[in-house]
Image (cartoon, rainbow, N blue to C red):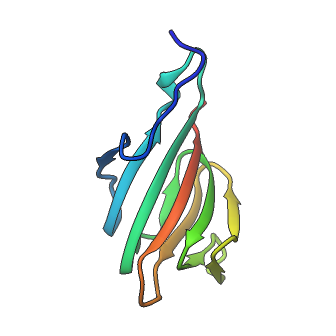
Amino acid sequence: MANIKITKKNEGYTYEAPGHFDCVLTRLHDAADISEGNITVGLSRFMPGGGTNYGPVPLESVYYIAEGQILFKDDTGTETLLTKGDSVHVGANVQKSVVNNGTEDTLMLVILKMK
């Protein structure tokens, strides 16, 4: 198995994830791409009003807002507006949701620790 995996633009693939709505999810890298890999990276495009249901994600996650804005709701119910350049690091099994409450698409880089 390789130790390096390059993904050129337009080489990612789209997929569906439970609890997501009004969005296009693109996988850029899978943990299985490299030997002993444990990171998965995706790019999520949320249309206005799009987002995720409130609930836990079983994996430690980092979300980086590349364009637009996302209203992030944490496990205490606190809502924080994240805009371009903001990021959030979420532990495994923590309740959260994200919703694009803006008027334009939001691009969010998603990094997941698989192991």
Q: Determine the residue located farthest toward the bottom in the rendered image.
A: 103
Task: Give the vertical position of 72 relative to 37 (above or below).
Answer: below
Q: What quarter of the picture does the C terminus occupy? A: top right
Task: Give the vertical position of 7 relative to 102 (above or below).
Answer: above
Task: Give the vertical position of 89 relative to 67 (above or below).
Answer: above
Residue at 38% of width from left, 42% of height from top?
12
Q: Determine the residue located farthest toward the top in the rendered image.
A: 1
Residue at 57% of width from left, 44% of height from top?
112
Residue at 52% of width from left, 58% of height from top?
56
**On the rendered structure, is 100 left or right of 80?**
left
Is 51 or 73 nearer to us in this picture?
51
* Residue 97 at x, y percent in the picture: 51, 70
Count every numbered label the image shows and give the total: 0
Is 20 or 64 nearer to us in this picture?
64
When asked about the image quadrant of residue 24, the answer is: bottom left
Is 58 or 23 nearer to us in this picture?
23
* Residue 77 at x, y percent in the picture: 61, 80
* Residue 6 at x, y percent in the picture: 52, 30
**On the rendered structure, is 43 left or right of 111?**
left
**On the rendered structure, is 84 left or right of 11?**
right
Residue at 58% of width from left, 76% of height from top?
72
* Residue 42 at x, y percent in the picture: 48, 49
Task: Give the vertical position of 108 relative to 110 (above or below).
Answer: below
